[in-house]
Image (cartoon, rainbow, N blue to C red):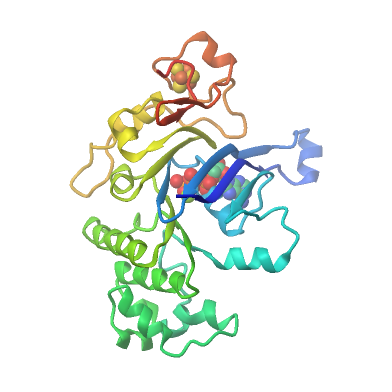
Amino acid sequence: MSAIIKVEHLTRVFDVSKPWLNRVIERLPRALLTAVSDVSFEIEENSVYALVGESGSGKSTIGKIMVGLVAPSEGSVQVEDVDLATETDATKVEAVRANIQMIFQDPFASLNPRWRVRDVIAEPVAAKGGDTTGLAEKLLEQVGLSAADAGKYPHEFSGGQRQRICIARALASEPKIIVCDEPTSALDVSVQAQVLNLMSDLREELGLTYLFISHDLTVVQHMADRIGVLYLGRLVEEAPRDVLFDDPKHPYTQMLFAAAPKMDGFGREIDPPKGEIPDAINPPTGCAFHPRCPLAIERCSVERPEMRNLGATRVACHLAE
Ligand SMILES: Nc1ncnc2c1ncn2[C@@H]1O[C@H](COP(=O)(O)OP(=O)(O)OP(=O)(O)O)[C@@H](O)[C@H]1O
Ligand code: SF4
Ligand SMILES: [Mg+2]
């Protein structure tokens, strides 16, 4: 097994300053928000790598960098040994980009309502001048819908069916890698399982590799081979799924797990992790988790813990053992 994706020291800073004139009048400094900070991980071919973390932890930003919707400020993403930021051969970069597709959380927003499903699905191929004869019909059947659905419009489908259409569209250009950003979070729990099973089947059938973004640990446990836990833009723990679930080493991961099983009848979390997520513009010093960490010692507010190996786990915490 070899890594199909290598992410090294990935960092993305957003300038969230007020307009120049306001800054001058109100004597405000420039405001920079570090959404992703020094994140490194690798994804094996034909595996599912999940990124988990609370809202604002940088999950979607990493996904968008992967598919080229957002540029990294520092660090690199290598796909099949092509460095997307520094590779000068444009055809090489284009070929690699064509191999990565993305599925988003809101299946309605990502489908053009005025287009028939046939055109929605075939568009990525049509845009490149490829042959689309029978393509939408074949893909619709592959994702568990019917070929006859090709003539309908997106509003004629349920949420779960629409996400299947998005998956069909993502598969149209025969990608090797799919970035899935909370693909089932907007769906009913019963429909979620069906769509997730479809995604698992497709992965096996087509030999796909997934970067799977989710805040839902139940979903992640079902889908992932390897899991990275993000806190305020930094990777704080990474391990194979079973290792992480059996023996979470970072206090933040432990807090996520303690909160996870407490779902109400609608599958909503009723006991989220304690404490406020800090301001990403002025993150806490040392270990960014220290204001919420039940184990924090003095060193934690001063010195940022480096990522280190503990068995099969990588963890960034002074006290983890
Ligand atoms: N285009 C942007 N401009 C400014 N700030 C941004 C931009 N995109 C993201 N951010 C900020 O970067 C941080 C990370 O955002 P991101 O969307 O990656 O988080 P997330 O983990 O996907 O959260 P969620 O679970 O809510 O989707 C947040 O603080 C967000 O406000
Ligand atoms: S480094 Fe300190 S504050 Fe951070 S998670 Fe570990 S114990 Fe908690
Ligand atoms: Mg997001």
Residue placed most toward the observer, 313 or 13 = 313
User: Which residue is farthest left?
Assistant: 265
Left or right, residue 60 beside residue 265? right
Seen in the picture, residue 294 relative to 88 is either above or below; the reply is above
Residue placed most toward the observer, 234 or 96 = 96
Instruction: Give me the residue at 62% from left, 34% from top.
Output: 281
Left or right, residue 104 beside residue 233? left
Seen in the picture, residue 270 relative to 104 is either above or below; the reply is above
Q: In x, y percent, where is residue 48?
A: 40, 51
Q: In x, y percent, where is residue 76?
A: 65, 46
Residue placed most toward the observer, 146 or 57 = 146
Quadrant of the snapshot with the C terminus: top left
Q: In x, y percent, where is residue 250?
A: 41, 25
Instruction: Give me the residue at 47% from left, 84% from top.
Output: 119
User: Which residue is farthest top?
Assistant: 298
Seen in the picture, residue 309 relative to 70 is either above or below; the reply is above
Looking at the image, can residue 253 be seen?
Answer: yes
Looking at the image, can residue 53 be seen?
Answer: no
Q: In x, y percent, where is residue 62?
A: 55, 48
